[in-house]
Image (spheres, rainbow, N blue to C red):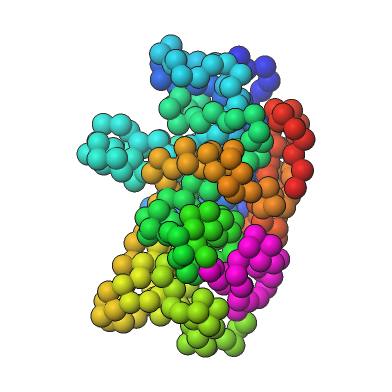
Amino acid sequence: MATKPNLAAVLYGPNDLRLEKRPILEPAFNEVLLEVDTCGICGTDVHFLKEGGFGAQMLIKPIVLGHESSGIVRKLGSQVTDLKVGDRVAIEPAAGCRTCDLCKVGKYNVCLNGKHCPTQKHDGNCSNYFTHYADCCFKLPDNVSMEEGAMLEPLAVAIYAARKIEVGLGSKVLIFGAGPIGLMCLIAAKAMGATRTVVLDLARVKHRLDMAKKLGATEVIAIGKDDKEDDLVKKIHMILGAPADRVLECTGSQPGMRISIKSTRNAGKICLVGLGNDDVTLPMVDAISREIDIMTAMRYNHDFPAAVETVANGLVNLKPLVSHHFDLKDVLEAFRVASQSEGNKIMVHLVPRDTNNKKKFVN
Ligand SMILES: [Zn+2]
Ligand SMILES: [Zn+2]
């Protein structure tokens, strides 16, 4: 049952984010009502905030931001049997329509009629309450904190991308971009067996490169404004001892994609994870003649179960990624910090910290 008003971080337009009361929706037969505990801020939320959206997802009405959340089940829809009231869960925000061709072949993550959130038609979950499909809620074992539960979403992004290009035992991996998704890609790649990793980002976000080093990157490269593309490629080859087998490109920028292609070995694989420049010029003759596979990844494709398992079993440690904690009342400041790329993962707490953790969250 809901016991308080539903305050939500609602975006009205570029740089117009408001904390306001929203109705609490009844769960449908296959849904649950969740009391949101923790919500991490993501790069896509920042795109919405700064530019009013991205690609085809431009704002057409005010929407609630946020999609990296964990919560407590407060009410069950009439046919929900796998969850019970009081369960602690991570919320997978990608939900297909379940009936279209894409959903039927398992590509629900890019379903056109899906209830993915936040998108221009669907609210996100930086709100006290959220109703969602029960099968998109993943139970958290006792040893997984609500903060880690919220971070399963970006971890699932990384696992999906790394699985797509078959990162494996002994892979030499280049990760372009040291924002939260880049760092998650580093964590996932190492957990999947990568033995050499190099992470690149701009020198001005040194704190993020320092975090990559702390998380076990073999080496990081801080890109200065005078650095030439080919010199960076040489440095990458030197660190990895050879061209990269696998690349996770997390910036979506033209330089990121160009350097990724040039740094990859013949028949290597690249996954484009980041959203950046709309149009880019790439060395495609080089890519084709060396048979480099360039793939894309959007959201995840049933990767939450693996994400829960790897955190619960200690194969990965996400805790160091959390750099800031804000209460919901300070959500505007939380988004300001996120949009300045200060810190790493920024958490908004919708209930007082540690209310639903078995052990106090420390990192
Ligand atoms: Zn995200
Ligand atoms: Zn569908």
Q: Which residues are magenta?
A: 196-223
Q: Residue furthest top?
A: 78
Q: What is the quadrant of residue 347 in the picture?
A: top right
The residue that appears at 44% across and 43% down in the rendered structure is: 303
Spot occupied by residue 90 in the image (x, y as percentages of width and height): 55, 34
Can residue 228 be spotted in the picture?
A: yes
- Image-based side of 224 in relation to 167, left or right: right
Spot occupied by residue 362 in the image (x, y as percentages of width and height): 77, 43
Camera-nearest residue between 49 and 204: 204
Q: Residue furthest front?
A: 169
Camera-nearest residue between 295 and 225: 295
Spot occupied by residue 86 in the image (x, y as percentages of width and height): 61, 18
On screen, 3 above or below 281?
above
Q: Residue furthest left?
A: 101
Mark count: 0
Rendered-image quadrant of the N terminus: top right
The residue that appears at 49% across and 58% down in the rendered structure is: 193
- Image-based side of 360 in relation to 296, left or right: right
Spot occupied by residue 321 in the image (x, y as percentages of width and height): 67, 53
